[in-house]
Image: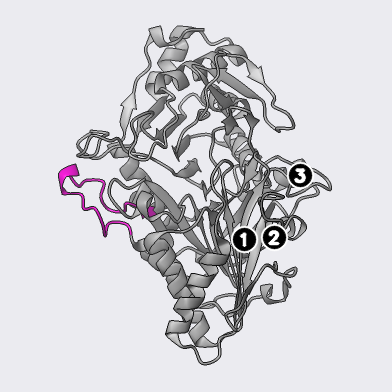
Amino acid sequence: MSLTIAHLHETLKSRLPQFSERLFGQAGDTFVGGWEKYLFDTPHGWWTTPNREFPDRGHSSQPARSMKACIEKATHYIDIVTMDEPTGDFRKDVEDGLIALAVSGRPVTVRFLLGRQAGGPNLHTWMMLKQLADRIRQAKPRASQLNVYLAQFRWESASWNHAKLIAIDGCVLITGGHNMWDGHYLAKNPVFDISMRFDGGIARGGHRFADALWNFVRANNRRPPGGATYSNYLNPELKIDESAPPPRSESFEAVTADTSTDVDSHFPALWVASPGWGVYTTPRVLEGAMMIALVEGLKQAKQSCKMSLQDLGSPHMSAVDFKTWRPRDYPFDLIGCGGSWFILPLIDNFAEFLHKNTSATLEIILSAPTGGAHSYGHGVKLQTILNLLSQRMNAQFQTSKNHALKILNERVFLKTIAFSDGREAWHDGTKKDNHAKFWILDNKICHVGSENCYPYVQRLGQAALQEFGVIGEFPPSVRDMVMEGYYNHASRHGVRTDAKLADLTW
């Protein structure tokens, strides 16, 4: 077996046989161009800028502008799936794209779905559509044929949409870690993150996963207090009601291949999704395709695993060390260490990867554990992660503490995100946050998406969120763009934590 998209696809079909083209799918014609239009890392290009010179605005406008540019070119269908209400320039640029469609007169249907975290106030979808309608009126379209459906999505208190994607006409897809939150990304002390644009049939996966979410909306379209999933509809006459869109026709998906790109630059890719609670009940499934693919990829990788992540440990604490837990109906065992929960199959496969490949390296770049400008770190000390890795080496392979320490200090690079001066803090003293969900195995198989590599353990139990991403078998041109344009900067400027024998407490 080899580390290829084809092998990962076969693994998913074997593990989730009833969910092909529902939770995952393969496309062989995926295309990624230059970084200006396809790589959205924020704040881009500021890795070597001294903190005192970092501007409060204007440093990260590329993602929002690119969303607008793609939206306004749509001809048939758009799915926008994100978490919470878009704000600031994100909202303005998305609305500007929709207004351009209304003015164009093209018959476009837009499904806009917003996940809402449990405990937060409900979103005013009717008011959001009214404000959009007011802006469309000001543009004075002659004959708008724009249909916009807008929904809040949540399953009770344990599941809400966390995916971030824009799929357009079955041929353009933007996905990654970016929420559409102006204050977190476009203003002072921005969060570090990455999203990408992918062209080709891979975009159909975005529509198909959105289909599943909207099926849930149609079945559970009830406003509070009876429900927390509901939708509104803005028709071409700019009238608003409470209907949900009918099931989508896939007729437009037979798109003609883009002949303007060199076929040799196309590559195979998988779209991968996690259903969360409530989306698929016949049969019921909670397993996420991304984590299955990552664990299998680690089994096949030989050289390197490089990751840029928000965190590895859960946001809520536990008092158990080296104890496993299988929460109700959750697909993966968890293990506790240092007050946090971790995904046990992931940690175990990190340990196995390092054990069987004696020159392989593992590098993970994380948020500052505490004191972040937007509090994305979970308080998990990097020494805790090193301790857990060594303990799982011992549990699986009887690795001694001294040998584990040697592996950790020679081949494991745990870092927090920073600038070139090595400081983790902004000029006001708050630390830098990382919200990326990026990994690449053997500099070849790469994931960009919304799904974290930590379990979302709440005080009342395990939450399971809806997620989406793309795993690509990148050709050298795309790999080099992503590594040189994003990851290598994060690696060079990260602050490493070394392991000490005293940290290994098992």
Would you say the residues marked 1 and 2 are in contact, meaning their CB atoms lie under 8 Å apart? Answer: yes
Instruction: State the CA–CA distance, disc 1 to disc 2.
Output: 9 Å
Tell me: 90 left or right of 164: left
Q: State the residue position of label 3.
A: 16
Residue 169 figure quarter:
bottom right
User: Which badge, 2 or 3, is on the more N-terminal residue?
Assistant: 3
Query: What type is the residue that disc 1 sits on?
Result: Ala
Vertical arrangement, residue 216 with respect to residue 404, above or below:
below
Residue 462's label in the rendered image is none
Answer whether residue 34 is visible to the viewer in this image: no
Name the element at disc 1: strand
The residue at 58%/30% (across/down) is 458
Looking at this view, is 367 or 245 the one in front? 245
User: Which badge, 3 or 1, is on the more N-terminal residue?
Assistant: 3
Q: Residue 405's spot in the image, x, y percent? A: 42, 13
Vertical arrangement, residue 339 with respect to residue 369, above or below:
above
Instruction: State the CA–CA distance, disc 2 to disc 3.
Output: 21 Å
Residue count near mark 2 (Cα–Cα under 10 Å), binned few <14, some 14–19, many ≥20: many
Q: State the residue position of label 2.
A: 214
Q: Residue 18's spot in the image, x, y percent? A: 80, 49
**In this picture, which residue range is highlighted in magenta?**
41-60
